[in-house]
Image (tube, coloured by chain):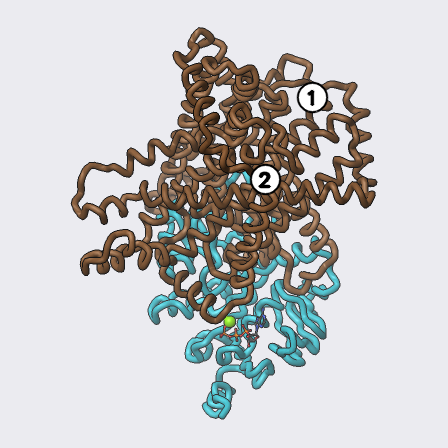
Chain colours: A cyan, B brown
Amino acid sequence: MNLGTPIFELKNVTKQFGSFQSLANINLQIWAGDRVALVGSSGAGKSTMINLLNGTLLPTQGEVWVLGHNLSRLPRKSLRQIQRQIGTIYQQFHLVDNLRVIHNVNAGHLGRWSFFKAAISLISPMEVGTAAIALNQVGIAEKLYERTDRLSGGQQQRVAIARVLVQNPSAILADEPISSLDPERSREIIQMLRQLSQDSGKTLVTSLHAFEYARNYYERIIGLRQGRILFDASPLAVSPSMVEELYRTEE
Amino acid sequence: MNRKDIKGRFHRTLPKQPSLLNSRTMWGLLFVAAVIWSLHESGLFERDLVNVGGWTLVMRFLIAATRPELDVEFLQLTLEATLQTLAYGVCGTAFSLIFGLVGGILSSEVWWQSISLVKFPTPWLVVRFFLAIPRAIHELIWGLFFINIFGLDPLVAVLAIAIPFGAITAKVFSEILDETPRQPLMALLNSGVSPLNAFVYSLIPQSFPNLLSYAFYRFECSIRSAAVLGIIGAGGLGYQILLSLQSLRYEEMWTFLIALVLLSGSTDFWSAMLRRSIGAPSRLDLNLHLSKPKSTLQNTQTLAIHLLQGDRLVKVSLFAAIGLLIFSFWYVNADFTKLSSPQTFDLLIGVIQDSFPPDITKFYQLFTLSAQTLAMSILAIAIAGIGGILLSFPAANNLLLPEDNSHSLWGITVLVFTRFLLLFTRAIPAPIWALIFLFVLFPGILPGAIALAIHNLGILGRLMAEVIENLDQRPLRSLQALGATNSQIFLYGILPRTLSRFVAYILYRWEVCIRATVIVGLVGAGGLGRLLTEQLSSFDYKGLVSTLICFICLTFLVDLISATVRRSLR
Ligand SMILES: Nc1ncnc2c1ncn2[C@@H]1O[C@H](COP(=O)(O)OP(=O)(O)OP(=O)(O)O)[C@@H](O)[C@H]1O
Ligand SMILES: [Mg+2]
């Protein structure tokens, strides 16, 4: 990868749902190895942004460039090839809950596996070693064969992270990964993500409700308000008044 | 990397992989074995099955599809036939609902408990047992039987639908009543209200949405049955289709087929709209107890609100139903006095005297025919189940069309095409499919199995698509976001979450299939059905009784296996 080009770039991006503008005229560059927190109140457009970055949504106007490709221009097959390079962790309910943990973790391989390999693995799990190492890394190796819906919310988030580990992407996106967890569990998960990014040099983009975590664990904070970027700065440069402005309610 | 290395790295034990031999895989293996056995029974491995000479007919038949007969006079005939089938369906449904409501109350546990208020031995089970027998005998057998008594009279079609469907409705109604919360009923009973009044003021309105939803499902089935009954001479679309098929007038046949698809499609559509607007559960879920009982109260409330606020659809539907009922009775013009005439009574007595003692000399023949019938039903349901699962995927309207793409021409084309394919396959009754396949296949269980499979594939595919449409989309989107292909998403995101429900549907349709082997037997596919129809038309009542007993045992066996598998997979 050329260090000169950003890993993610939004050029004048607008995303509209019907007549409602969820993101308006966003310009943004994220470089390899960056650790970025997206903050903003509910409805500010954080999830929309994450979904644009991983190709789940396409912009209404403007261009989304990922790893040097304009996503709107890519045919489905090449889009999938880019998507393999991006791992996403969501808030909740994004695992297939009546599969065993091993299969949810192995789903990280799907971008590389053939249909037949995927089918056979459902009957007799393949690459158990890789999955076990990933689960060990997130601290729940003993849950390998458990059914996913028997796990607690925090454990399910760990499974989601293990899946990303198996996928081994160049960038990790996390959409409010901690908003349904208690403070202790939240801290563990955020630390884990940060550690992961530090160890492997992977880019990390996390959307967060809680500003404190953004300040303590990230090098760059992007504040979104009503679909626009309010600030884009290092934690030290974000003043209390900026934060107040960010979460201010319309009167 | 092997297990040992991994263990070394972890400094703790890796969990043991659960054994592959669980009840699921065991049933799966049994299923595969059953299919192989059925293929063997069908003679696929030994005999020549394809009649090469039939291809020219098939070509003519297919070409005729492009130019159905559209002459005005002929269209009038088609309209009359369609109305006749519709009217049979409506009258049959009306009687089966009356029968079902009375039988349903009498075979419900809650009724007997409320009239005695003491727990005394289970009279409802006795009623249920007596209802199981008319239920096990297919409409067509009833139809052939009534022809022997009444001759070719509209009464035949109406009764042939009313009796077995009444018994099925009674069973489902009794289960709905028993599962409805009882506190309001108990409150009324304890304040001295008579049981019948208490029912009318509590359980019946409480369970009304479920009862209504099922009634409409029965109506859809009755229309299909009415078409089938035409084949034995009762008139209507089925009869016309058979005539044009036999006289090789395929252009006319296609016109009738299109009329049948339209009739059946619009009843399905009406019923689906109504169910959605009152928030009633899916029909099959009622059958299979897959819906949550707690929704009943809420449903009643929404229904009440709909009725009070004068929801247009519900109101119009009720008036339409009443209008349709009056029209149908007038159009059918059946001679209901025949029911109570002394001549009918004498004939019935005669039949009963002729039937005993049953003929048990053909025991060995019955055994082989039973095996063939079973094989036919297994093949049919295997094809229908697998085909249904595969087609349900493109037929689900919300699937994997990324938001921005949802109007892509290709996606819509695939959706509309599969939907239409499913509608077409299920609207054409199995015996018609069998007749078509008999062009190119020699008579035997294979054409019968294929015909049943195609008809059931249409039904299963649509139901399964509905299940997929109701799935939570988030796990699918997350698989899509990591670069999985559609077929992989199907494997990892859809199948695991739907398979148990799919299997339940498939097993339920298997129970229907084993009963329906009779109707394809009628047109020349093998099995007990063929023997039954032969015995009926030659008035061999002694033989008939033993064949019927055999057939009923077979259906009970299938019901038992199906219930066992469903329970162990839950
Ligand atoms: N698929 C959609 N259809 C219509 N509107 C949408 C859709 N997705 C998002 N929106 C709208 O876009 C706006 C931004 O939504 P988004 O989910 O990006 O916000 P968010 O910052 O993630 O909020 P939260 O913190 O509540 O998750 C919201 O007003 C939402 O209603
Ligand atoms: Mg969000």
Q: Is residue B9 visible?
A: no
Please, what secondary structure does the residue beneath circle 1 have? Answer: loop
User: In this picture, is A251 found above or below B278?
Assistant: below
- Horizontal side of A89 relative to B560 (left or right) equals right
The amino acid type of the residue labelled 2 equals Arg
Against B494, residue A164 (above or below) is below
The image quadrant in which ligand 1 is located = bottom right
- Residue highlighted by disc 2: B224
Residue A19 location, quadrant: bottom right
Q: Chain of mark 1?
A: B
Q: Amino acid at mark 1?
A: Leu
Question: Is residue B369 something one can see in this rendering?
Answer: yes
**Near-viewer residue (A27 or A202):** A27
**Quarter of the picture holding the C terminus of chain B:** top left
Looking at the image, which residue is at 47% across and 60% down? B279
The reply to whether callout 2 and callout 1 are in contact (CB within 8 Å) is no
Q: Position of residue B40 (x, y in %)?
A: 56, 17
Asked if B340 appears above or below B43 in the picture, the reply is below
Q: Residue at x 66, y 55 (%)?
A: A81
| Residue where numbered disc 1 is placed | B441
